Image (spheres, rainbow, N blue to C red):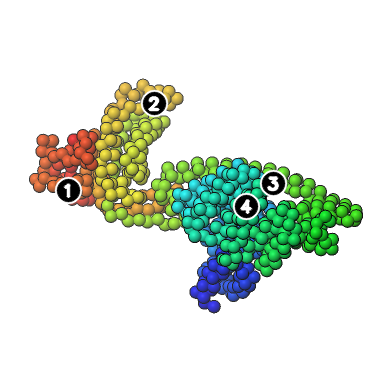
Amino acid sequence: MTHEQLKTKVEELEALVKSGNDHAIAETQARELLEALSIGESTGGDRELHCRTLLALVILLNERGLAKDALQYAEQALALIKQSQDIALEARAIGNVGTVYEKLSDYVKALDCYYHALALDEKLGKKDRIARHIGVIGIVYAKLADYPKALEYMSRALTVDEELNNKQGVANHTGNIGSVYWYLSDYPKALEYFSRALNMAEILNNTQGIAHWIGNMGSVHEKLSDYPMALEYYNRALSINEQIGNKGGAATIIGNMGNVYWHLSDYPKALDCFTRALALDEELGNKNGVARHTGNIGALCSKQNLTVYDAVRAEGFLLDALSISTEVGDKVACIEFHKNLADFYEQEGRITDAYSHFKKYTSIRELLNIEETRKQEAIREQQKQIEIARTRATAEKRILNNILPEEITQRLIKGENPIADTFDCVSVLFMDIIDFTKLSTKISAEHLVHLLNAIFTVADGVMREFGLEKIKTIGDAYMAVAGAPVVQQDHAHRAANAALKLLELMQNLEVSFPDSLGDKSWIESLPEIHVRIGLHCGPVAAGVVGENKFLYDLWGDAVNTASRMESYGEAGRIHVSEEFVRTLFPSQTLPEREGFSVPDESFTLSIGEGRGEDMVRAIPRGNLDIKGKGIMRTFFLERG
C-alpha cells in the first residue's frame, strides 16, 4: 500500500476504535496494518502511522481487559515515537501507557505517566490535552480514594475546558465529579452532577453520553435502594445503547439490572440478566466484564435457599471467574471470588477447599493492604517531587521571561528555531546617560553598578507600563521597542508616552546608596545625571541569535536611525525623526518651513482624547546632517 492508502486505513481504524463497537474486527485490522507498516518503519511518515496503529491496538486490548498484553504495544509505540521526536505523539503515547498501568491498578506508574504527558502538553501549549490529562489524574486519585485530590484535579480540568469552550470535555469532567460524590455516598450531589452532564450530552446530541449518564443515575437510585426508579433509568439507558449498537454499554447496564433483581429477590430475572450480559461481553472479548458476570452467576447459583441454586454450576462459574480475574491481574476481583468460593465450599461441607480459598482470600487482601500503603507513600513522595519540580520550573520560566519576551520563550519551548520575524513599522527607543564615561571614573564599581541598576530599573518599569519590550542595555545605553514581538497599531503613541514619562523620572531621580557599599563622600561632587532619548519609526527584522545565552534583537535601518536620534540629541530632551512625528500624528499636517529652532515656532498636537497629559509639543529642530543618513528633518518632543 502507498503512504496515502496506509494513512486512510489508520484513520478508519481510529474511527472504528472510537465508536466502541466491533472490537474483534478492529483488532484484526490493527494487526494487519502493523504487518503492512513494519515494512515502512524507517520513514518518518510511516513511523507515525505505525505508532498510531499501535496506540489503537493498546486501546482495544485495554478495553478487553488485556492490559498486560497492551503494555508491550504501548512501550513499542513509545520507543518509535522517541526516534521521531514528535512531542505531541509522545505525550499521547505516554498517556496511553498510563491508562494501561491504571487498568493494572499500578497507580504510581499511571500517575507518573500522566504527569509526564501533562508536562509535555504544557510545553506544547495544548490546552485541550492538558485538560484531559489533569482530568485522568483526578480519576486515578478517585480510585485511590483520595477524594479531595480527585475533586481538585477534576475541577481544574473543568475550568480549563470551560475556558476553551470544549463542551464535551466540560460534560465529562462534570460527570466524573458526580462519580466522586457517588464514591463519597453523597448521592444528592452525585445526582446533581450526573444531571448536569446528562443535560450537556443532550445539548451536544451525544447519544452514547446520554446513555452513560442515565445509567449512572440509575446506579445512584440503586444505592438509595429505590429499585423501581433504578430499573426505570437502567431500561432507558439500555434502550439507547441497543439503538446505537453499543454492546459494551448494554452489557454493563444489563449486569446492573441483574443486581437490582437480586435485591428484589427476583432470582430468575437476575440470572437471566447476568447470562445476557455475559454473552455480550464474551462477544466483545471484554474479559473484565466476562469475569464480573461469570462471578455473579456463580455467586447467585451458590445460594442453597434460592430457587436458582445449582452447586455444580456455581462452582464452575466461580472458578472460571477467578481464573479470568487472575489472568487480567484484577486482584480486587480475585479477593471477592476467593471469598465466594470459601463460603460456598464451607456451605457444601468441603472444609479443606474452603480453608484453602479463605487463606488465599486473606493473603491477597493483606498483600493489597501492604501494596496500598506503599502506593500511598510512593504517591506522596511523587507529589512532593512534582511540586519541587514545578516550583523550580516556575522560577526558571520567570528568569527566562526576564531574558526573552514571553511570546518568544513560548515559541522556543515549542521547538521553533530559528526565530525570525519582519515588522513593517515599529517604534525604537534609545536612552543614553550623558558623560557616563567621566562619571564611571569618579566612583567605585559597586556604586556604579548600583547606580545603573537604579536607572535601568526605573526604565524597565516605564516600559512595562506602556507595553514596550526592553531589548538590551549596552554599557549606559538602553534600547526598547514598541510594536514587536507583538504587533501594536499604536506603537508610536506608546513610545512617545514612555519617552516623556521616562524623561520626567530621570530628571527627578534620587538614588540612595547603602552603607554596605562603602564611602559615600564623593556623592556631593557627583554631577547631575542627564539622559538623551531618541525615537524613530520604521521596518525592522527581529529574532533570536545564538545557541547559548539567547538574545532577542532587532536589525535594520530603523534601529540605526533611532540610535542616531539619541546621539545627535541634547541632554534632558527627546529627539525624534520626522517619520516618528508623521506616524504619531498621521492626520496632522506638519509645517512646511525648514529650519525651525525656537519654541515659539513650535506646534502642539494631541495624543488620544486630547487630555492635558496627552498634549505633546513637537518643536522643529531644522535640518541636521546625520552621520550615515545625510540631511534629516528632526524634532524635539515635549509635554504640551
Of the two numbered discs 4 and 3 on the same chain, state the one appearing first in sequence. Answer: 4
Residue bearing mark 2: 513
Tag in front: 4 or 3: 4
Q: Which amino acid type is marked by label 3?
A: Lys
Query: How far apart are the alpha carbons under marks 1 and 3?
Result: 70 Å
Inspect this view and state whether residue 75 appears. Answer: no
Q: Quadrant of residue 252?
A: bottom right
Give the position of the N terminus as an image quadrant.
bottom right
Q: Nearer the viewer, residue 579 or 260?
A: 260
Query: How far apart are the alpha carbons under marks 3 and 2?
Result: 56 Å
Check the image and report above or below for 474 versus 505. Answer: below
Left or right of residue 133: residue 619: left
Tag in front: 1 or 3: 3
Residue bearing mark 3: 375
Q: Residues within 10 Å of mark 1 (few under 14, many from 20)?
A: few
> Residue 102: x percent and y percent?
65, 54
Query: How far apart are the alpha carbons under marks 4 and 3?
Result: 39 Å
Tag in front: 4 or 2: 4
Give the secondary structure at mark 4.
Answer: helix
Q: Nearer the viewer, residue 462 or 380?
A: 380
Residue at position x 54%, y 73% in the image:
9
Q: Nearer the viewer, residue 190 or 474?
A: 190
Residue bearing mark 4: 229
> Residue 570: x percent and y percent?
21, 37
